[in-house]
């Protein structure tokens, strides 16, 4: 009997150690590399643009949030999709090749070496940004649009731009501002909740009905108010609500989303924001699902709940605010 108890205790200990070890393994595996982005010349401010998704039914007017950038040697304004769900900035191979062909003076820094570009400089809202090293994905448009006013997207600006800085997004005026610290004039008019830039992912301690676990703010999920698990989705949707199904291209991988109306609201301090809709997604990889479980994530918030508002992402202060 003593031997059996010893065996059972040993098995239990191995399971516990395996769970703890698996947790730290997943944390290390998905930890982002050292921040390669440097920003000078703050404060900076500019106007962002919305890119529509006309393939959706109905069409989504605010599918992607684009910020304008100027690349040395290039007379054309280019754009980066702003995506807090991306832990670091990346560029797209096809648009870079098109830029090199059209603007040879911009070429040297835009030539990938083993799927990586080095020392890329660009200006954003009056600030000067430099990426010492960034991945290049086999992605994007092959040619510049004939309409010079049409946005030409050359990459993604990730959450590395938030590290050590404050970002203010004014959705009604479509303006973004980067600061070293939150202006007092805005802080006095905001309701704040805790924010953690964990693994360069924006984690909020906002409240939802029946929620357990943090929420991640993912500006790259603009078309969705809240992405959550299927079980939570079923709890939050209105009874007998119509469901909209859509295929989504995520970095070249096709996923399927299911969206339905909800009466649920997001609460941040004294501020309550109706969600309008809630969604869940299928087609994620096993690694993505394991990361979600390890992080304890309750869901991902897109831009939609904050439409008509100004938000503050204060990474140094560890807080997320909605201006009243």
Image (cartoon, helix red, strand yellow):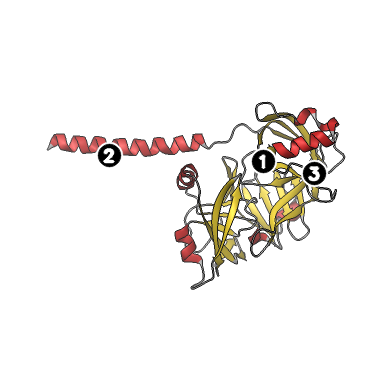
Distance from disc 3 to disc 2, alpha carbons, whole Å, reads: 60 Å
N-term-proximal mark, 3 vs 1: 1
Judge from the rendering whether residue 258 lies leftward or rightward of residue 11; answer left or right.
right
Q: Mark 2 points at which residue?
A: 12
N-term-proximal mark, 2 vs 1: 2
Mark closer to the observer (2, 1):
1
On the question of residue 40 being in view, the answer is no
Q: In which quarter of the image is residue 120?
A: top right
Q: How crowded is mark 1: few (under 14 residues within 10 Å), some or many (20 or more)?
A: some
Please state the horizontal and vertical placement of residue 279, each as a whole percent of the image.
Answer: 54, 60
Q: Residue furthest right?
A: 75
Q: Can you tell which mark lies on residue 144?
A: 3
Q: Can you tell which mark lies on residue 139?
A: 1
Please state the horizontal and vertical placement of residue 209, each as a whole percent of the image.
Answer: 50, 64
- Name the residue: 74% across, 49% down: 66
- Name the residue: 77% across, 42% down: 143
Please say if the residues under marks 2 and 1 sit with CB atoms less than 8 Å apart: no
N-term-proximal mark, 3 vs 2: 2
């Amino acid at each position: 009997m003593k031997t059996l108890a010893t065996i059972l205790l040993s098995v239990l200990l191995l399971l516990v150690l395996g769970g703890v070890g698996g947790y730290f393994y997943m944390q290390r595996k998905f930890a982002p590399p050292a921040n390669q982005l440097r920003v000078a010349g703050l404060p900076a401010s500019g106007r962002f643009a919305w890119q529509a998704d006309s393939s959706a039914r109905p069409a989504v007017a605010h599918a992607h949030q684009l910020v304008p950038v100027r690349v040395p040697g290039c007379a054309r304004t280019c754009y980066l999709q702003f995506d807090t769900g991306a832990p670091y900035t990346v560029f797209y191979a096809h648009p870079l090749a098109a830029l090199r062909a059209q603007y040879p003076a911009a070429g040297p820094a835009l030539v990938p070496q083993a799927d990586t570009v080095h020392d890329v400089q660009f200006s954003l809202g009056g600030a000067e940004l430099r990426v010492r090293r960034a991945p290049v994905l086999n992605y994007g448009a092959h040619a510049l649009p004939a309409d010079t006013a049409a946005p030409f997207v050359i990459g993604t600006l990730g959450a590395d731009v938030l590290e050590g800085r404050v970002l203010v997004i004014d959705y009604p005026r479509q303006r973004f501002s980067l600061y070293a610290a939150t202006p007092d004039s805005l802080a006095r008019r905001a309701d704040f909740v805790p924010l953690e830039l964990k693994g360069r992912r924006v984690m909020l301690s906002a409240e939802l009905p029946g929620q357990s676990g943090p929420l991640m703010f993912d500006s790259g999920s603009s078309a969705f108010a809240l992405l959550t698990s299927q079980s939570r989705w079923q709890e939050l949707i209105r009874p007998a609500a119509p469901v909209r199904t859509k295929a989504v291209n995520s970095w070249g991988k096709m996923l399927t989303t299911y969206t339905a109306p909800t009466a649920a609201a997001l609460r941040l301090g004294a501020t309550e924001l109706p969600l309008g809709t809630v969604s869940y997604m299928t087609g994620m990889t096993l690694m993505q699902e394991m990361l979600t479980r390890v992080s304890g994530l309750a869901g991902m918030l897109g831009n939609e709940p904050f439409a008509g508002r100004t938000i503050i992402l204060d990474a140094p202060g560890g807080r997320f605010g909605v201006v009243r």
